[in-house]
Image (cartoon, rainbow, N blue to C red):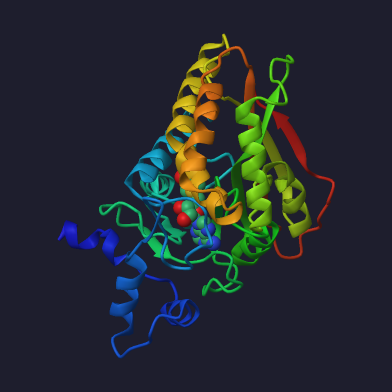
Amino acid sequence: MEQQERLESPDTPARSQSRLATEVGFPIEADTSRSLSESILQHHRENGRTYHRYKAGSYFFPNDPSERDRLDFQYEILKYAFSDKNYFAPLKDPRTILDIGTGTGQWAIEMGDEFPNAEVQGTDLSPIQPSSVPQNVHFFVDDASEPDWVLPPDYFDYIHTRVLLGCFADFKAIINRAFHYLKPGGFMESQEIMSTPYCDDGTMPDNWPFKEWMATLDEAAMQADRPLRIASRLKRWYQEAGFVDVQEKVFKMPINPWPRDRHLKFLGRMSEDNWLSGLQALSLAPFSRTLSWSKDEIEVYLVDVRKAILDRNIHAYHKIYVVWGRKPEEGEAVDSSSAASIAAP
Ligand SMILES: C[S@@+](CC[C@H](N)C(=O)[O-])C[C@H]1O[C@@H](n2cnc3c(N)ncnc32)[C@H](O)[C@@H]1O
């Protein structure tokens, strides 16, 4: 009985099957739901990796087991960076929670455990969520860039996004849409890595291969209309969408364990592992599809990037931005200058 109430990944439904069938161009047969769920479960193969089948080509990064492991690890890294917090918005007994681009669904699952009275929905282009999840957690194959999320407006108490750089042509439009689907008084929160590497002590040369790799990835992403540098713009986009009490926290994530500080050193160690294990996954589709590099050219190029990541003499780090805001209550007077910025260690 317990087993029946849990959601098995192969049944991850499409939130709107008619929309999905029409737009992807799958044949609409009598048994539409069956043909549809089979189609979205097939993965697209390219350069030895697999990618999402629904809206194929729209997202650059793979969905195969090694990338899923990396996403799970990235979840642990952010949990550590945030000193075990899953969210910063001042949530009080939320009943409806949405995680856009949920990936392997770890965040949604933990939120389901923490808030047993809440219905937690996770959406993604790929049905890569685990097979056994809490009863109050549900995953859907859905494209968040669609203008209609097939839900009533003012529905969610809390909407969350995490590491969605490079997913959307217009992330500001996602924020605006989330505002529409949030209840008055509800919160939205985004947790994003700024792709630009920073250095405060002059040890990062402009020709450092990791910095050059990141610039090349950025160029490919811009050509494909999937910008990476969204994190530092979130606060302004939240304010422009109409959110109030907008807060921003900025965390440092060292690229390898160069810092002396124990917390940052450990974070750097995890970050280094994440970059090394993800480098190929993050490069293949952008560099081949957009810049027309061959797989061999990419592999050769990455040799020096890997060495650069391991170089402890270069004191580089990424910034992680966490931004949250509240949708005003009906009739609430709004002071648009109410945003705050908090620098975290
Ligand atoms: C880097 S992963 C982050 C996953 C998760 N939020 C996390 O922090 O682990 C980005 C996810 O967004 C999903 N995604 C990309 N474009 C999307 C879209 N248009 N609609 C919904 N999900 C999308 C991808 O399939 C992928 O699982």
Quick one: quadrant of the C terminus?
Answer: top right
Where's residue 145, x and y in %?
59, 66
Residue at point 65%, 60% (across, down): 169
Q: Is residue 161 visible?
A: no
Q: Which quarter of the picture shows residue 9?
A: bottom left
Relative placement, left or right, of 287 versus 72 is right
Relative placement, left or right, of 193 versus 9 is right
Residue with the most extreme bottom position: 30
Quick one: quadrant of the N terminus?
Answer: bottom left
| Above/below status of 229 relative to 173 | above
Where's residue 222, x and y in %?
68, 52
Residue with the most extreme top position: 260
Q: Which quarter of the picture shows residue 223?
A: bottom right
Relative depth, front residue between 292 and 192: 292
| Above/below status of 207 relative to 325 | above
Relative placement, left or right, of 33 versus 212 is left
For the image, the number of numbered tags is: 0
Where's residue 234, x and y in %?
70, 47
